[in-house]
Amino acid sequence: MIKKVTINTLKKIKEEGRKFSVLTAYDYSTAKYIDEAGIDVVLIGDSLAMVALGYETTHSVGVDEMKIFTKAVAKGVNRALVVTDMPFLSYHADVSEAIKNCGEMIRLGANAVKIEGYSQYILQVVTRLTETGIPVMAHLGFTPQFLNSLGGYKIQGKTKEAVDEILQQAKDLEKAGAFSVVLEMVPQESAKYISENLSIPTISCGAGKYCDAQVLVSDDVFGKYSEFTPKFARKYGDMKEFIIDCAKKFDEDVKTGKFPAETEVF
């Protein structure tokens, strides 16, 4: 019997000084394969706005779209913890709406939700979600949903004051009930300091090797999305070329009459 990864599993991993892995998935088969590979957390990232739907930023994806992808991914996962990224404006209007939208993701198969940013209101949302039984993964540092407010894709936590501020925010989110926190585009030394001073696991998204986990967009890892690759992403395959090559071979076989063969017809 497969032992399911839970938020307690991740806490234990941190306490034991080990690491865990996080990858995004947006469809049933990809989720199934990365789960079988041993990935510990599968994130339905709002990055699907760009890599799956062709939008320019994460701002364009909505709750209804995230529901479809959450349901598909959850069906493919047996072992990993499934986390849904809550999209822009899905938890910002009021706490009741936040609980409703996050609860829908849990109902469709997610085990937790991820919420970006920090404010007294966000702390209230995290507290209420946790009280409702919805685990929350926090997200600090560079927060894509606040791209316009941050003035672009800028590294966060480059000064002692800025690092202390992120650490205090993380501690507040931990106190509110967050079970982990993503640190995005934070200098490695800053992320190390933050990680060492938190009880909950930290997940690096371009924040160096000293966090308790690493997260990447699967399309970057597989070499499928070619429009833009972050500095911190590592390409382990070349699915773009593989897909093009397979499609070219199929096209040629169709046009030369090689497909279908006698074994492929009724």
Image (cartoon, rainbow, N blue to C red):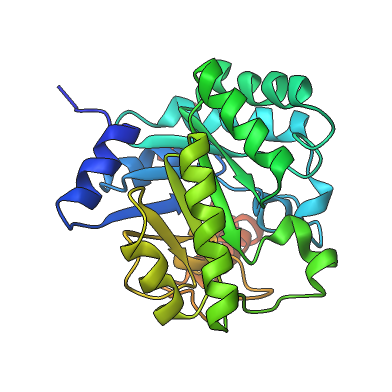
User: At 62% across and 19% down in the image, what residue appears?
Assistant: 103
User: At 42% across and 31% down in the image, what residue appears?
Assistant: 76
Horizontal side of residue 100 vs 72, given as left or right: right
**Above or below, comparing residue 157 to residue 115 in the picture:** below
Which corner quadrant of the image does residue 86 belong to? top right
Residue 7 visible at all: yes
User: At 57% across and 83% down in the image, what residue appears?
Assistant: 158
Residue 249 visible at all: no
Quadrant of the snapshot with the N terminus: top left
**Above or below, comparing residue 69 to residue 184 in the picture:** above
Horizontal side of residue 205 vs 103, given as left or right: left
Which corner quadrant of the image does residue 189 belong to? bottom left
Q: Position of residue 138 (x, y in %)?
A: 54, 47
Q: Nearer the viewer, residue 246 or 203?
A: 203
**Above or below, comparing residue 161 to residue 3 in the picture:** below
Horizontal side of residue 155 vs 78, given as left or right: right
Q: Nearer the viewer, residue 143 or 108?
A: 143
Q: Position of residue 257 (x, y in %)?
A: 59, 55
Horizontal side of residue 211 vs 124, given as left or right: left
Q: Position of residue 106 (x, y in %)?
A: 55, 21
Q: Nearer the viewer, residue 9 or 236?
A: 9
Q: Position of residue 128 (x, y in %)?
A: 61, 24
How many marks overall?
0
